[in-house]
Amino acid sequence: MSREMVQFLEQWAPFGGGDDEIFTTFGVDPTVFYSRLAHSLRADPTMAVTLDVDKLIAYCIRKAGTSRDSQGR
């Protein structure tokens, strides 16, 4: 499923992430989604096809923190 998650991320990252679609598409909350993706992209940077892998990892880390912060409110 990681490839599908990366494709989703590459499609939605330029528009803010598509957080509203993550649970219905992948069955996990956005925090889990972004954390898993950061780990997967570190393990296999070649999974990123259309966007810079370092930027995607940084984006995932930022979004995982943002999602966690917004859930606590």
Image: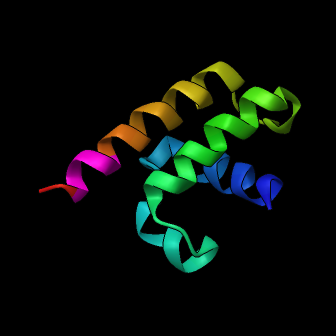
- Residue 20 position, x and y percent, is 41, 69
Indicate left or right for 39 with 50 as reference.
left
Q: Quadrant of residue 10?
A: top right
View extreme (top): residue:
54
- Residue 53 position, x and y percent, is 70, 25
- Residue 12 position, x and y percent, is 55, 52
Task: Name the residue rendered at 54%, 68% in the picture.
Answer: 28
Please count the marks in the image: 0
Task: Name the residue rendered at 44%, 52% in the picture.
Answer: 31
Q: Quadrant of residue 55?
A: top right
Relative vertical location of residue 54 with respect to residue 24 in this rendering, above or below: above
The C terminus, quarter of image: bottom left
Task: Name the residue rendered at 81%, 27% in the picture.
Answer: 45
Magenta span dominant secondary structure: helix
Question: Along the line of sight, which residue is nearer the eye, 23 or 11?
Answer: 23
Q: Examine the structure image and report whether residue 68 is included in the region drawn in magenta.
A: yes
Task: Name the residue rendered at 74%, 39% in the picture.
Answer: 40
The N terminus, quarter of image: bottom right
View extreme (left): residue:
73
Q: Which region is colored magenta?
A: 67-71
Question: Along the line of sight, which residue is nearer the eye, 15 or 69?
Answer: 69
Relative vertical location of residue 7 with respect to residue 40 in this rendering, above or below: below
Relative vertical location of residue 42 with respect to residue 36 in this rendering, above or below: above
Type of colouring: rainbow
Q: Examine the structure image and report whether residue 52 is included in the region drawn in magenta.
A: no
Indicate left or right for 73 with 46 as reference.
left
